[in-house]
Amino acid sequence: MQLAQDFPEVNVVGIGAQDDLRQANDFVTRTGTGNGDITMVWDPSFESWRAFGIRSQPYWLLFGRDGELLYSQPGSIDFDAVQGAL
């Protein structure tokens, strides 16, 4: 959520795939990620994870305006990398 607040020009999307939809909705409510800063998507098939090569959580991807993948790595978001891409 901090990323979306610090960089409002960046579209942040969270992909929920673990547990179940009820738990995902609870997470959105508890963390305040449903306030419009972040778009949350539910994908119980894990197909989105496979498509992007995600093997663990947390994991982050950064795409450029043209859809080119700029960064892909497990762990916490690298705010310096995001700032550098902007």
Image (cartoon, helix red, strand yellow):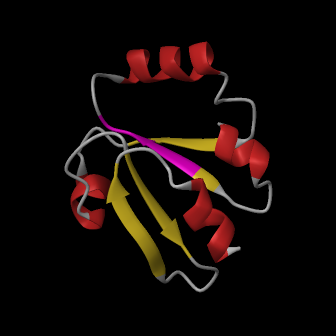
Left/right of residue 51 with respect to residue 16 in the rendered view: left
The residue sitting at 63% across, 75% down in the picture is 85
Query: Residue 28's x, y, as percent?
Result: 56, 23
Compare residues 43 and 49 and report the one nearer the observer. Answer: 49
Image quadrant for the C terminus?
bottom right
Work out which residue is located at the far front of the displayed protein and give it: 80
How many numbered marks does the figure carry? 0
| Magenta stretch contains residue 59 | no
Q: Nearer the viewer, residue 60 or 34?
A: 60
Relative to 7, say whether 34 is above or below: above
- In the image, which residues are magenta? 13-17
Quadrant including the N terminus: top right
Residue 36 shown left or right of residue 84 in the figure = right
Residue at the spot 74% in from the left edge and 30% down from the top edge: 35
Residue 39 occupies quadrant: top right
Q: Is residue 11 above or below residue 16?
A: below
Q: Main secondary structure of the magenta part?
A: strand
